[in-house]
Amino acid sequence: MDFDRVGVRDPFSVFGTTKPKAKSPPDQKAIGLWIESVLGTTINIENLHESLKSGVLLCKLLNKLKPDLNIEYNEPDENGTLHPLMERENITFYLDSCWLLGLPAEYLFVTSDLHSNQEMNKVLSNLERISNEARNWGWDGVVLGTPRKTKTNTK
């Protein structure tokens, strides 16, 4: 239908709906801080891609959130380097584990999204969802968007 021809500027209004709102991009800094909090280590939050590219932190993160998962992954050598194929394999281990945990397909990404820095927003969306799902797996630590409850002294 040619909506301009019939005098309708917003085709969604014809159907009584509104335009879908654009989803805001995930907050990289918040996600980085959450990963630091869960793992108890410092990472490069300003360049989260570089921190996650090897897949090691992703596997460690899932192992921490769901200890009985026990993902095995490739560790860097004594110089702190890991062959790119092993990095990609680690990302695949992580994604396979996400699938086994029942993460919906729309929250998964492909290895090159992270490793080649092609779609970092998909990776960040995945991590947001992992954080939200963690409570269902028995995690009682910090999750994104929910401040950690602190015990107050009552007398």
Image (spheres, rainbow, N blue to C red):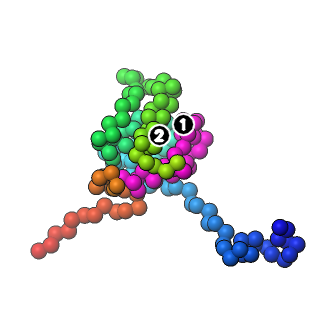
Residue position for label 2 = 95
Q: Say how many tags the image has.
A: 2
> Can you say whether 26 is above or below 117 in the image?
below
Residue tagged by mark 1? 111
| Residue 63 point in image, percent of width and height | 33, 41
**Camera-nearest residue between 93 and 153:** 93
- 50 horizontally vs 22: left or right: left
Going 40% across and 27% down the picture, which residue do you hit? 74
Crowding around mark 1 (Cα neighbors within 10 Å: few <14, some 14 to 19, many 20+) is many
Q: Amino acid at mark 1?
A: Thr
For this orientation, the residue located farthest to the left is: 155
Image location (x, y in percent) of residue 50:
50, 38
Across and down, in percent, residue 53 comes to: 49, 36
Q: Earlier in the sequence, mark 1 or mark 2?
A: 2
The answer to whether residue 33 is magenta is: no
SS state under label 1: helix
Mark yes or no: residue 11 visible.
yes
Which corner quadrant holds the C terminus? bottom left
Q: Between 125 and 66, which is closer to the camera in this rendering? A: 66
Residue 139 on image: x %, y %: 30, 52
